[in-house]
Amino acid sequence: MSAGAATKDEWFDNPDPDTGEVGLRFGCTMCGNCCSGPPGYVLFTEEEGRTIAARIGVAYEVFLRDYTEDTARGRSIVEVRRGHGLDCVFLDRSSVPGKAVCNIYEDRPAQCKQWPFWPEMLAARGNWVRAKGMCPGLDKGRLYTPVEIRVIRDGAETDGGRRS
């Protein structure tokens, strides 16, 4: 969409019935729920993969072999079975007591950076409300304007992301 083109109102453009705020609040609690649970996908571009490989100190080919797998949707970061279900291999639940930390946070794929503003989460208010059951940071923390939400959402395709 070009810069001056009109946008169709979406549900988060309207004032919240309870708070009157326009936009959505989100504040990460470091619970790790968005990086854990049932099987999912963490898709990445080759450039993102090379950046992650450099961050963890391995050759790109080693990263692909040891940290990723082919899926129906493309190459995905692997998951490992732990106490909370399937965790992203880069999720660390032991370094910071009571918190889940991403070991590649600064270089995480665009799909991860978009959370929770994935297209499927924003398609209907009910999707957002249902997701509050797994993400304690929804409707808390910083208020994102509708423009900020669209920029984040439209920044990359998630197409079947981890936990929708």
Image (cartoon, rainbow, N blue to C red):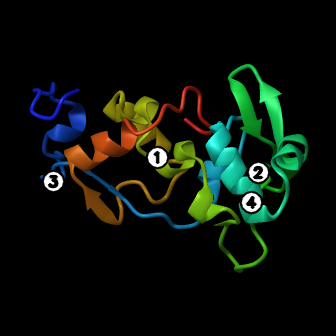
Q: Read off the residue under disc 2.
A: 87
SS class, disc 3: loop
Q: Earlier in the sequence, mark 3 or mark 4?
A: 3
Q: CA distance from mark 2 to mark 1?
A: 18 Å
Q: Read off the residue under disc 4.
A: 54
Q: Which label is found at residue 52?
A: none
Dot 4 amino acid type: Ala
Q: Provide residue 108's location: percent of width, then percent of height.
A: 61, 54
At x 23%, y 40%, the residue is 12
Q: Read off the residue under disc 3.
A: 21
Q: Are marks 2 and 1 in contact (CB under 8 Å)?
A: no
Q: CA distance from mark 3 to mark 4?
A: 42 Å
Towards the viewer: 57 or 79:
57
| Corner quadrant of residue 161 | top right
At x 29%, y 39%, the residue is 150
Q: CA distance from mark 3 to mark 2?
A: 34 Å
Dot 1 amino acid type: Gln
SS class, disc 4: helix
